[in-house]
Amino acid sequence: MIRNTDYELIRVYLSCSFGSKWEVNDNKYIDKLVHYIKILYEYGLKNSISYKKFDIVLADTIGILNAERLNTILDIINKELQEEVFNYIGLHLHCDNNFEDLIDISLKYNIYKYDSSMLGIGGCPFSENKLVGNISTYDLIKYFNSHNILTNIDINKIDICNKKIKELII
């Protein structure tokens, strides 16, 4: 049990939140996911941990998520738990540069916490058919800017960092 409230941020990842090739992704699977989210959410409330310091990250660990599945799961979470739970939820998505639909759906549920990586580097070696990368930080910020979602992140500085990383790895 956490007793010190001076921590910066707690992030709890629920890997394979949207299924895996090793488990049947059915209603029972989703019920377990909702149960775990509820336990973590209630823990945060009970211990007066602000959503600004506590993230429950739903991870598409192997890159199998699609827009329909995300909407279905978030809708079930919305029906089963208090709407405020979405303040605590973040997403770790893997994609092949087609993340916009997933972001649009999650924004509909007031989710504003996302993992991303410079140049989209990373991904899961256990994905179904190909290596799917992380969402590019530059692309995510550019997308938010185009939808007038304030990030307080200077996209030009992200671009400079991207160029420097490319120089270092090529």
Image: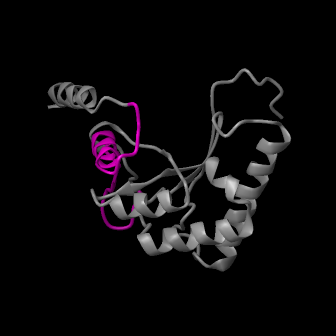
Q: Is residue 65 above or below residue 134?
A: below
Residue at horizontal 36 percent and vertical 31 percent from the top: 153
On screen, residue 102 versus residue 120, left or right, reads: right
Q: Quadrant of residue 25?
A: bottom right
On screen, residue 1 versus residue 123, left or right, reads: right
- Name the quadrant of the C terminus: top left
Camera-side residue of 133 and 39? 39
**Residue 103, x across and y down, in percent:** 41, 57
Whether residue 80 is visible to the viewer of this picture, yes or no, is: yes
Q: Is residue 22 above or below residue 97?
A: below
Residue at horizontal 17 percent and vertical 29 percent from the top: 163
**Residue 31, x across and y down, in percent:** 71, 71
Q: Is residue 57 above or below residue 163?
A: below
On screen, residue 90 versus residue 162, left or right, reads: right
Colour treatment of the image: one colour
- Name the quadrant of the N terminus: top right
The span shown in magenta is: 126-152
Residue at horizontal 33 percent and vertical 40 percent from the top: 137
Residue 86 part of the magenta segment: no
The single residue placed furthest to the top in the displayed view is 6
Whether residue 21 is visible to the viewer of this picture, yes or no, is: no
**Residue 141, x across and y down, in percent:** 33, 41
Q: Is residue 95 above or below residue 10?
A: below
Residue 151 part of the magenta segment: yes
Q: Quadrant of residue 27?
A: bottom right
**Residue 63, x across and y down, in percent:** 41, 61
